[in-house]
Amino acid sequence: MSTSKTIIFFGTDSFSVSALRHLIEAGYAISAVVTKPDARSGRGQHMIAPAVKVLAEENNIPVWQPTDLADIKDDIAALDQPLGVLSSFGRIIPQDIIDLFSPGIINVHPSLLPRYRGPTPIETAILNGDSETGISIMLLTAKMDAGPVYAQATYPLTGTETQADLYESLADLGSSLLIQQLPRIFDGSHTPTEQIEADATYTDLLHKEDALIAPETAPADVLARKVRAHLTFPKTKLSAYDQLITVVVAHDSDQPEHNLSFICSDGRYFVVDELVAPSGRRMNSADFLNGYTPKA
């Protein structure tokens, strides 16, 4: 296996870390890691480095954090057509940057393209109750997730996965598939297959405002899936006994099971099993009802 051609890696979050770690362990020459600038986070608003920056610095790999990708164009050009690898970068790469790479930038995308292009394929697969999802190794183009596909791997869904669970599982699957495919991509013997544009579907960016639910406006099973799909962000919140709670475990039922069972648009019930109370403490429904509801 040839690992001599230089790579520039684009990534940001924990999903990216798996791909970068696999590349390092496989012995690929990584000239730089491109990631977002450090950002303030948390109540203390401390500056937090992207997860891939931490791993890169641990392995003495240069880190580029441009506010504008045009700022690193000359640095990329100086490397004489490296290969790009991208995993959960979170920014659009313009065509004039893509053109600096040979054969281009390889993207690890967590869906079975052309299904679920866009920013939230993992959340959408859970929310829609899909029986499977997967990974696509594709050649990046300026149009979002529309490039030709080198390989895909499917991943079965059980209907119990949470957002964080599926991110971790698909990160591992995607990294393994990437390492498997790279030798033939490097030597030019692997030709990707164009996507069928008519089959493309798209996912939406999630916002904090998407957390609040009104049970009477949606089917119970959809709301139960939303809890799992949005567990890390944006979370699932509703008003109960004049308190705003964050639901962390829930299920749907054909009958009310306790006083945190909410009638839904389909006549079934959204039943809260565990939650985070306004105090910030995680608890089961019985403890919440004991501590936060009016006493007779």
Image (cartoon, helix red, strand yellow):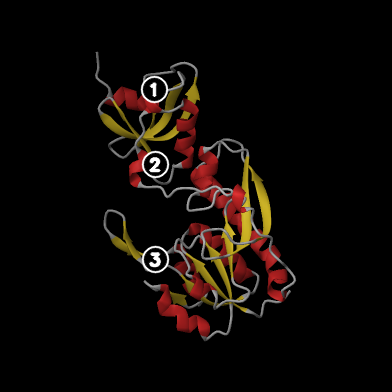
Q: Label 3 is placed on what type of residue?
A: Ala
Task: Write the residue at 36% across / 67% down.
Answer: 38
**On the image, numbered disc 3 is attached to which residue?**
49
Q: x%, y% of residue 251?
A: 48, 28
Q: Residues within 10 Å of mark 3 (few under 14, many from 20)?
A: some
**On the image, numbered disc 2 is attached to which residue?**
235
Which numbered disc flags the more N-terminal residue, 2 or 3?
3
| Residue 262, label in figure | 1
Q: Residues within 10 Å of mark 2 (few under 14, many from 20)?
A: many
Check whether the beta carbons of the residues at disc 3 and disc 1 lie within 8 A of each other: no
Drawn side of residue 221 relative to residue 24, left or right: left
Q: Nearer the viewer, residue 175 or 189?
A: 189
71 w.r.t. 281: above or below? below
Q: Nearer the viewer, residue 225 or 165?
A: 225
122 w.r.t. 11: above or below? above
283 w.r.t. 296: above or below? below
